[in-house]
Image (cartoon, rainbow, N blue to C red):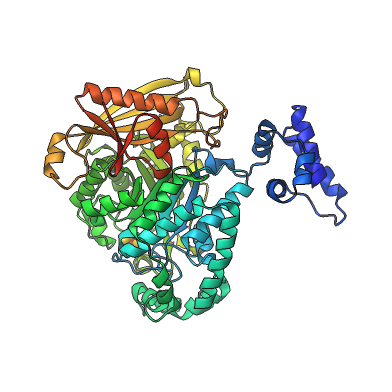
Amino acid sequence: MDEAIADIFESLRANALDADELDRILRRASRRRADGRRVAKKQVLPYFLNARTQRTAAWESWGTTPDLEERFVAALQMKPRRTASGVATITVITKPQPCSGNCIFCPNDVRMPKSYLHNEPACQRAERQCFDPYLQAAARLQALQAMGHAIDKVELIVLGGSWTDYGTAYRRWFITELFACLNASEEQRADEARKRAARYEGLGITGDVDAIAERARPAQEAVTAGDLAYNDAVAALYGPGTPWEQAAAFQEAGWDDLQAAQEANETAAHRVVGLVVETRPDAIDPPALAELRRLGCTKVQLGIQSLDPGVLAANGRPIPVDAIGRALGLCRLFGFKTHVHFMVNLLEGTPEADIRGFGQLVSDEHFDPDEVKLYPCALVEGTALMEQYRIGRWRPYSEEELIEVLCAAMQAAPPYLRVSRMIRDISSCDIVAGNKKTNLRQMVEQTLRETGAPVQEIRFREVGSEPLDPASLILDEISYQTAVTREHFLQWVTPEGRIAGFLRLSLPEPAALTEWDGALPVGPGEAMIREVHIYGIATELDRPGTSAQHHGLGKRLVERACAIAREAGFAAMNVISAVGTREYYRKLGFRDNGLYQQRPL
Ligand code: SF4
């Protein structure tokens, strides 16, 4: 392997490394191996990174420079899409917990928090790490680094049923631990991982999936047969009288602990540039949002699924539609980015009604979210939907119907909406009926390209990892009205219409502030920057790259937003900064101010 790495560097110095040359080097290295085994591309980067800390003599013999190293990592990087939106994403899962909802399509896997299945990749990782946030984040950091991704800017996505169903102490502990993990050095993380593994083992909590499956099997069989409720099964497996009760004794943290971890993260090697949690619209009120903000959250994922009261009722979600609008409005006034889940092919839905419903979601001023996960409903064993399927009251859409609905949704999407996903990570073996194609989004986008249909949706237009000339970018401004704010979406676009970055500015309507008088952390005359995002393969902080990042594009968006707010008569600009971006905004003239950072206009 050492020789193969030396050959790759030599080829890089001669500017001769392309995919064919890399392949030739790896085949040559494979032939040199005494055991006859192939040297795979994915093995090279972890070996190289390990040498940096463990085998300095070999490292020095390769004569690396920062520029060569960057090109080496780019050539050997696996799965470049994962950081193509500019940050490394780490998804973590909270422990299994009873859910206060009872939706008929929602999986009942007693090894997981409600709605998740143990076969999903993030869930598998969480289970192996005893759902410990520190251990999950440490394992992901290590894996992403081994794949060659820059991991200095991290978006944390916390999933698992409804966040508000967990106790305050657990919620605070979970987030504190994530920050603590990102603040630690590689050696500290390894040391802490060993200690935690021993601690969980001492309590009788295992990460051995076979043992977990065996223990959960009787309860799972009873739940699947309809003889036991998910909530009761989970309470018996993880509640009082189980080892998890003892674990709960140390799974709590105070606000001081969290604040210390956040302050350390402001200048840490792995900074949190986004923090997302998921909950239900009926769990949103000003105190809940203030707590989320205190935890460092920047985005809220809300399960909406439908705007049709009949469909919501038929699917066990008796949430009034006006409560959904109210929740989205409150999130917006608090400055959060809103990310909703919208499901098509629900019980009593039709393709035509789904197209209409999605159109309403993205055009009605009471909703108009920033991002959508647009899923088809998938039938999973053990759900109440199974019975509806058996008696013929529900059927999955055909592939043609589904693609037609999703294509129509993409065409209805305004230029400030991002459709982040079109499938859940449910393994095809868990889907009894419904879409099993993991490339559904590519199929939809292919259809749209073939028909030449105009699509303004963000992800369809992202520049991704393409090199670009920042001087060629055009600043485009779109303004739209919501029930509680005047929104301005500022986007950098290439001459071909691709999007290289954007900013979301909210100017609150006085009437909305009056309605929530005293309950909001913002006052009259205060505008809010809810999001600034610049695309490109994540490059390390303070190191220029060839992507859209690090060309002052974000700063120019912020300055333009301030000018718009000033012209509209606002006296101050707030920004809902993530903990790891506070330093960036301080350099732009913002001062820490309660739950936000603020700059006078
Ligand atoms: S509220 Fe969410 S997690 Fe709970 S049952 Fe409904 S879909 Fe599942």
Expressed as whole percent of the image width and height from the top left, the position of residue 514 reads 11, 40
Q: Nearer the viewer, residue 359 or 567?
A: 567
Task: Name the side, left or right, on which 204 lies relative to 23.
Answer: left
Q: Which quadrant of the figure contains the C terminus? A: top left
**Residue 394 in view here:** no
Q: Quadrant of residue 404?
A: top left
Residue found 75% across the figure and 49% down from its top? 55
Task: Name the side, left or right, on which 400 lies relative to 590.
Answer: right
**Residue 41 in view here:** yes
Expressed as whole percent of the image width and height from the top left, the position of residue 412 reads 34, 36
Q: Quadrant of residue 380?
A: bottom left
Expressed as whole percent of the image width and height from the top left, the position of residue 350 reads 31, 51
Task: Tell which quarter ligand 1 is in.
Answer: bottom left
Residue found 35% across the figure and 29% down from its top? 589
Relative to residue 532, is residue 287 depicted above or below? below
Relative to residue 414, is residue 315 depicted above or below? below
User: Number of labelled discs?
Assistant: 0
